[in-house]
Amino acid sequence: MKQVVQNYKSGELAVLDVPVPGCKPGGVLVRSVYSLISTGTELMKVSEAGMSMLGKARSRPDQVAKVMQSVATNGVPATYRKVMGKLDSYTPLGYSLCGVVEEVGAGIDDVKVGDLVACAGNEHALHAELNWVPKNLYAPVPDGLAPRHAAFGTVGSIAMQGVRQGEPQLGEVALVIGLGLIGQLVVQLLAASGVRVVGVDPDPVRCELAERLGAAACGDPESAAVEAAVAELTGGHGVDQVYLAAGGGSNQPVELAARLCRDRGRVVDIGKCRLDLPWNAYYEKELDVRFSRSYGPGRYDPEYELEGRDYPIGYVRWTERRNLACFLDLAARGKVDVEPLISHVADFDDAVETYRSLKDGDLKAITALFRYPEQAGEAAEAVAPTVAVPEVKRPADPVSTPTRAAKTPVRLAFVGAGNYATSMLLPHLTQRDGVELSTVVTTTALSAANAQRKFGFAEATTDLDAVLGDKSIDAVFVVTRHSSHAELTRKALLAGKTVFVEKPLALTEDELAGVLAAVEESGNDRLQVGFNRRFAPLLQEARQRFGARTGPASLRYLINAGTLAHGSWYLQQGTEGSRFAGEGGHFIDTASWLLDADPVSVYAVAPSGNEDLQIVLRYPDGSTAAISYVTTGAPGFPKETLDLVADGKVLRLDDFVRASVHGRKKWVSSRLPKARDKGQNAELAAFIKAVRTGGPMPVPLESLVATTAATLAVQAGLAGGAPVTLARA
């Protein structure tokens, strides 16, 4: 990949070919779309690099002090080698960009591949085609905000932190000294906060721009018009706060601040200007001088920036990441307008010439952006991704199901007793004759005891191995969190148990392969996954009335999933998989059952900024199923609606309350008088019958595997941006 670098010793600027950064845990790999050139901070760095060694020393007295300390400790020769080695190295440029997530590292669950994010940091948001960015230094871009505007996120956060330090209140008057990029943003943020603003800058073009963007009046620092405007707006008392957003070596900004600030006003330093405070002026007014440190709390804290340890919102309301997200939100809602600040957009390949033009003054700009080449061609030429559908290998001598004595109850064990188990499964089983709830296993003793008391389990324990070793138990229900399903299923199969596992069966291809390896090793293929909708009586009847079909079908399935409550474990995508990975198998299984086949390819796309998914499944006979899984719909709209069209007929399902079939004859079901029946009771009846009789499982294992593979292919499709072929192993 390419990256803009500079040699601080020689001043050389270059676009180098460098290795692509790895995607480490706790962050994301981002492909740049636009990056912002700070005409203040970055040009100062570029100018310093062009100075003589004496000039560099004069411009950075803090670094000279460190060198002298090193000389005292390590001696002149060692210090010289160290300093020259550091100076004669390439250093990166850039710290504010917008890009597309290319890869997601372990532990990241708030963005996915293809999402647009704004990134910050002079080590992570560089002028480079690809950057690895830790979690607390990026924020998702809101819908509707253009990437070129989202590239302002970092500098917007700097301006926002400065404004927060000033603690503005409605009706106050502020003075902004320096109307460069940061100053222009400060003006807009203050105006959006209900503060009247007077701007100061020697450049009349910048003054005019600030007035267009919300300042009440602007002028040259030497102009009497500025003092007149302050006097008029404040009744002669002086401004409530001053924001120093200027650079350079003049002491004029701090002197002007003292003159125009009211008694006990606030002076906030955002830029890097000279700060020789006139003691008498600041003492007599008892001015409160404050500094604004970069993007906000968390800056320069490695535990926050690199390790992703957030500060509790109750103690630190506005961290640098929250400032970044807040600025993006304001820009998306039109409260801040950055488009007038863009003076020039250059192609990334022209980076060196752009910097030279800015440095030499040939290009005068408040802000310039680098535009990166589009990557659409790469996606078009890429090989379509493939997800393997593992072959189900059954041994020649499968484990036989023991003969059951007449009237002997089916003894069940439950691993997990959470909300779904206690509300959707156990109530049906407690009412079923010939079923004995033997043992409930949970990780906490109290939850096991509660389930035992409520549903009449004979025993409650936290010892899973004891349950799996109990030969009197016929079947094990796995109803735990998603991340444990595959491993618990594998163990139960190896123990010779018939297994009912709630969806999903697996969250990864490796987990799915592990389950099938257990089937092959043990000879035990007695497995059912909780895909209950195919058992729903209303849908069963509608399918029967629709009848057989002769041609390909089109199926549309809308799932109005809604939003999850804050704190739901379903949101823990790093450990529990995506929301669709958890429940999407329901809808793929239903479509495949209605179409009487397993899919051969999956195509998935997702709009930026939410969890909505559009999925298209293709089947061997040319049939297609379009699944819309949305979280942004109206809560009052039905959760599931389905249409199946083929051979001049239409099957319609309205949220398991009413169904209809339209053809030569029309059939409409009566509206169900009670709660929706999504098939759990019928599914459990079929499972218990298979356990009791030793007959076939309700759903063939091959179908369960195909549905799981198709669900996994959705994530692969989102990552690759192309249809995923489901290849039979």
Image (cartoon, rainbow, N blue to C red):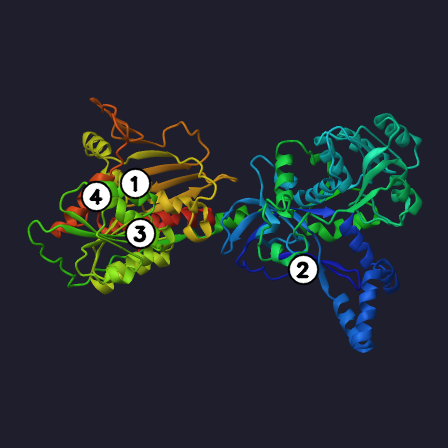
Q: Amino acid at mark 1?
A: Ser
Do callouts 2 and 4 mark residues in contact (Cβ within 8 Å)?
A: no
Secondary element under disc 2, as helix, strand or loop, is strand
Q: Which numbered mark, 2 or 4, is in the foreground of this view?
A: 4
Q: Is residue 717 rendered to the left or right of residue 169?
A: left
Within 10 Å of the Cα at label 1, are there few (<14), some (14-19), or many (20+) other Cα atoms? few
Q: Is residue 366 visible?
A: no
Within 10 Å of the Cα at label 2, are there few (<14), some (14-19), or many (20+) other Cα atoms? some
Q: Determine the image quadrant of residue 79.
A: bottom right
Q: Is residue 36 rendered to the left or right of residue 135?
A: right
Which residue sits at x=26%, y=34%?
677
Q: Which residue is mark 3?
A: 448
Q: Is residue 638 rendered to the left or right of residue 113?
A: left
Q: Amino acid at mark 3?
A: Ala
Q: Which residue is mark 2?
A: 16
Do callouts 2 and 3 mark residues in contact (Cβ within 8 Å)?
A: no
Q: Which numbered mark, 2 or 1, is in the foreground of this view?
A: 1
Indicate which disc, 1 or 4, sits on the residue closer to the N terminus: 1
Distance between the alpha carbons at the discs numbered 2 and 3: 61 Å
Distance between the alpha carbons at the discs numbered 1 and 4: 11 Å
Secondary element under disc 3, as helix, strand or loop, is helix
Do callouts 3 and 4 mark residues in contact (Cβ within 8 Å)?
A: no
Q: Which numbered mark, 2 or 3, is in the foreground of this view?
A: 3
Q: Which residue is mark 4?
A: 429
Which residue sits at x=87%, y=28%?
229
Q: Which residue is mark 1?
A: 423
